[in-house]
Image (spheres, rainbow, N blue to C red):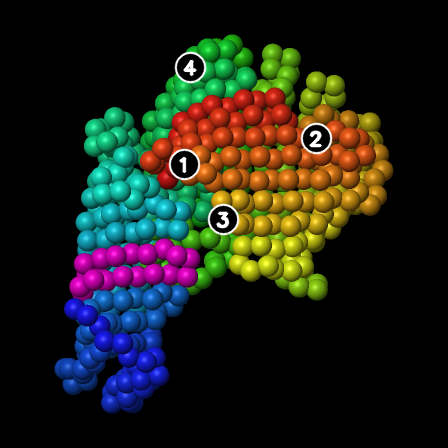
């Protein structure tokens, strides 16, 4: 049906006229903004019926459909025929019909297709919106936009717990070109903490510590906040690997992870990680929030980890334990329209030459100096770092300023940083400090060139006074349909990576 072209002014006048025809009490009590071709009152003016190009602004959503009914007494909204929901974060939901109680956000959605801002497509025969959870029935998930996706995961149910932030998917089958290749009875992940997961995606790759390696995982769920995955694998250099990762997440902001793995050539690897954070939601939306994992502003985080690991550089020479406590505070509104990041860490470290305790404090003030359109900006960051080491009582204090120009144009996305060391006293006894942290005037460059399907990623940090590179790393990715084949070289850790992957769930 071809639409006639009508001026926005005339449309606005028509909408105002229609709303003026409604009883004043109902218009005043509407909890949303409404536009439609036809609006009619029924059942003693307790039901509002709208049809034809219905548009409703509700919270941070825009809801469109051909038909909508609002029952005032029960605060129920009904949508049917070509229903579309979009939010401020570019997530969309298409459905055949939606029933929603706008007071409790409880309802049902039938024939749903969700496309997230991370380019995932989720289809569900039915979605039940409950008080503490969201339940998706008979689902498929993929990142492929083709009519016949190259890969997809088929699940009987996906349950999202609003309290713990955990998503639990049951009876999952991974299909490759419609051929079932991998069965996962249970898969779970914390929607707000990526580390709290029992994601069972197989791994295959190459690095210098293992050479060629492969791992297969099987996820399990004990309760709505206790989950894990059992893994087995084979490494060319280190032999057979087996073990498990266990996660306990009592709520969406807190998790405890226990890793226990045994490797044939190097013995035990693993440890305990505790993570807590306080976050502020970007919006007050609820329907798509829990399904698409809307971004949050983390204002405070605390992390404790005690892990036994093997260093990639000093393989077969060093095993080190790292019990460390790290506290981070983010203050988005600081003086002169800037933001402030603060980090405090206390821990015990060991490398090939030294072992001991390190206490570190880091403060960084960030300010956008100028924006050039939507994709380019100039940012200044002033950094104050203080590190204190015992038992030898070494100090390493620095103040440096970084000026960063970030630019995105066509196929090129680049970030150039000029760092000036304003003050430095002392040095670190640890090798990893001097490799990873600024200790001289530097020029830094991070660039990616998208030559679809090839993507070239390049990063370097050049120390101007020392006339040497602190870091050079580069990678080449080939995006084949929904798969990514990558080759990377990291000179910081003397590591080469080769692997094939699909996007994380």
Kindly identify which residue carries mark 3: 410
Q: Name the N-terminal-most of marks 2 and 3.
A: 3
Q: Residues within 10 Å of mark 3 (few under 14, many from 20)?
A: few
- Give the SS element for disc 4: strand
Label number found at residue 470: 2
Estimate the spatial distance between the alpha carbons at disc 3 and disc 1, rounded to whole Å.
15 Å
Which stretch is magenta? 80-98
- Residue 369, image x and y in percent? 67, 59
Kindly identify which residue carries mark 4: 234
Q: Residues within 10 Å of mark 1 (few under 14, many from 20)?
A: few
Left or right? Give the position of 467 relative to 449: right
Mark nearest the camera among 4 and 1 is 1
Estimate the spatial distance between the alpha carbons at disc 4 and disc 2, rounded to whole Å.
33 Å
Q: Given contact means CB atoms under 8 Å apart, are the residues at marks 3 and 1 in contact?
A: no
Q: Name the N-terminal-most of marks 2 and 1.
A: 1
Magenta run includes residue 81:
yes
Left or right? Give the position of 467 relative to 288: right
């Amino acid at each position: 049906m071809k639409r006639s072209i009508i001026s926005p002014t005339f449309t606005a006048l028509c909408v105002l006229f229609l709303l003026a025809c409604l009883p004043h009490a109902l218009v005043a009590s509407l909890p949303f903004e409404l536009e439609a071709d036809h609006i009619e009152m029924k059942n003693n003016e307790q039901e509002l019926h709208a049809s034809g190009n219905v548009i409703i602004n509700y919270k941070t959503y825009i809801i469109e459909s051909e038909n909508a009914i609002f029952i005032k007494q029960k605060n129920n909204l009904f949508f049917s025929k070509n229903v579309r929901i979009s939010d401020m974060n570019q997530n969309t939901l298409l459905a055949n019909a939606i029933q929603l109680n706008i007071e409790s956000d409880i309802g049902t959605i039938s024939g749903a297709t969700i496309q997230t801002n991370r380019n995932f497509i989720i289809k569900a025969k039915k979605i039940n919106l409950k008080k503490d959870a969201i339940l998706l029935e008979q689902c498929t998930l993929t990142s492929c936009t083709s009519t016949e996706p190259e890969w997809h995961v088929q699940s009987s149910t996906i349950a999202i717990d609003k309290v713990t932030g955990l998503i639990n998917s049951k009876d999952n089958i991974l299909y490759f070109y419609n051929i079932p290749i991998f069965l996962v009875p249970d898969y779970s992940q914390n929607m707000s903490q990526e580390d709290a997961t029992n994601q069972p995606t197989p791994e295959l790759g190459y690095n210098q510590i293992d050479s060629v390696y492969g791992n297969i995982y099987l996820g399990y769920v004990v309760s709505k906040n206790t989950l894990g995955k059992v893994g087995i694998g084979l490494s060319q250099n280190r032999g057979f690997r087996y073990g498990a990762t266990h996660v306990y997440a009592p709520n969406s902001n807190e998790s405890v992870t226990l890793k226990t793995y045994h490797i044939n050539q190097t013995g035990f690897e693993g440890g305990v990680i505790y993570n807590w954070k306080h976050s502020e939601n970007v919006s007050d939306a609820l329907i798509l929030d829990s399904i698409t994992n809307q971004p949050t502003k983390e204002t405070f985080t605390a992390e404790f980890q005690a892990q036994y690991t093997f260093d990639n550089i000093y393989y077969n020479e060093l095993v080190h334990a790292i019990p460390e406590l790290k506290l981070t505070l983010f203050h988005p509104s600081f003086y002169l329209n800037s933001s402030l990041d603060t980090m405090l860490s206390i821990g015990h470290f060991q490398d090939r030459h030294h072992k001991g305790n390190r206490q570190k404090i880091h403060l960084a003030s960030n300010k956008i100096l100028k924006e050039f359109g939507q994709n380019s900006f100039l940012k200044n960051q002033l950094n104050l770092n203080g590190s204190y080491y015992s038992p030898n009582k070494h100090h390493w204090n620095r103040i440096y300023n970084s000026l960063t120009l970030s630019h995105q144009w066509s196929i090129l996305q680049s970030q150039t940083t000029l760092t000036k060391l304003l003050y430095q006293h002392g040095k670190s006894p640890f090798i990893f400090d001097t490799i990873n942290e600024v200790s001289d005037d530097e020029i830094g460059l991070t660039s990616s060139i998208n030559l679809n399907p090839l993507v070239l990623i390049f990063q370097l940090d050049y120390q101007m006074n020392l006339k040497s590179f602190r870091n050079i790393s580069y990678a080449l990715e080939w995006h084949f349909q929904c798969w990514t084949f990558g080759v990377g070289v990291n000179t910081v850790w003397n590591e080469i990576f080769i692997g094939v992957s699909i996007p994380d769930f």
